[in-house]
Image (spheres, rainbow, N blue to C red):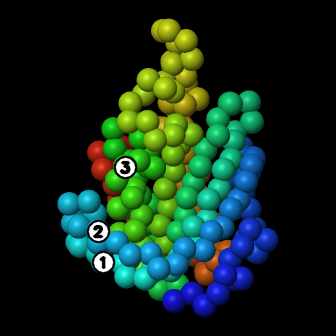
Amino acid sequence: MLSNTTICSPATIPPPVVFGADILSLSATWVQNYTLNVPTSFNYNHGDVALQNTEFWNVTITYTHPGHDDRITVETWLTGTWNERLQATGGGGWSAGQFVLSDFFMPGAVGEGYAATTTDAGLGSAGSPEPWAMTSPGNVNLYSLQNLGYVSLNDQATIGKSLVKSFYSKDPEYSYWSGCSQGGRQ
């Protein structure tokens, strides 16, 4: 388990470098006594996981691509019982990553010893494209579509790996992606 709250704070984490992006904020929150049973039905590609009084750091990065009017969030959980692997958790439907099942995907990954990361692709947690897909009737918001399709996913991997390197002083041995119906594309 992690011993104290001084090993990870915004002051001790160098902001990740993301090509073409500006980091807007970096926060680090110490989470203690996290308890949750994650059933297989909500932990795709994995079995049941029981977290009991788990401790981890929730490091959240918010950034933008200047000129694109976007605001993307990447959340990364770093555990003291790290298995030297990074698991990116993804979304379903029109959600890139942070959506209703993230409440199970992220804890499931941390419960198995992974550092875990997810992104909202700047789209929030909307389950449909209506809030972000159009700039006006008949005009597709190409920046948001690109963020959903590939930009935010590459950024998520870059940020997650950078935070792992900063926190554990080494790169992950392996990196994985696990999620819902967006998985075929992601």
In this picture, residue 75 sits left or right of residue 83 = right
In this picture, residue 24 sits left or right of residue 127 = right
Q: Measured from the top left, where is residue 141 in percent x and y?
A: 55, 22
Give the secondary structure at mark 2: strand
In this picture, residue 107 sits left or right of residue 145 = left
Work out which residue is located at the far left of the displayed protein and give it: 41
Give the secondary structure at mark 3: loop
Quadrant of res 29: bottom right
Find disc 3 in the rendering and name its residue.
100
Q: Measured from the top left, where is residue 2 in percent x and y?
A: 57, 87
Q: Label 1: few (<14), some or many (≥20) within 10 Å?
A: some
Quadrant of res 178: bottom left
- Residue at 51% from the left image edge and 19% from the top image edge: 134
**Circles 1 and 2 in contact, beta carbons < 8 Å:** yes
**Circles 3 and 2 in contact, beta carbons < 8 Å:** no
Give the secondary structure at mark 1: strand
Find disc 1 in the rendering and name its residue.
50
Separation of disc 3 and disc 2 at Cα? 13 Å
Separation of disc 1 and disc 2 at Cα? 6 Å
Determine whether 95 is above or below 69 in the image: below
Q: Nearer the viewer, residue 163 or 127?
A: 127
Is residue 115 visible in the rendered structure shown here? yes
Q: Label 2: few (<14), some or many (≥20) within 10 Å?
A: many
Which amino acid type corresponds to the residue marked 3 in the rendered image? Val
In this picture, residue 74 sits left or right of residue 99 = right
The label shown at residue 38 is 2
Separation of disc 3 and disc 1 at Cα? 19 Å
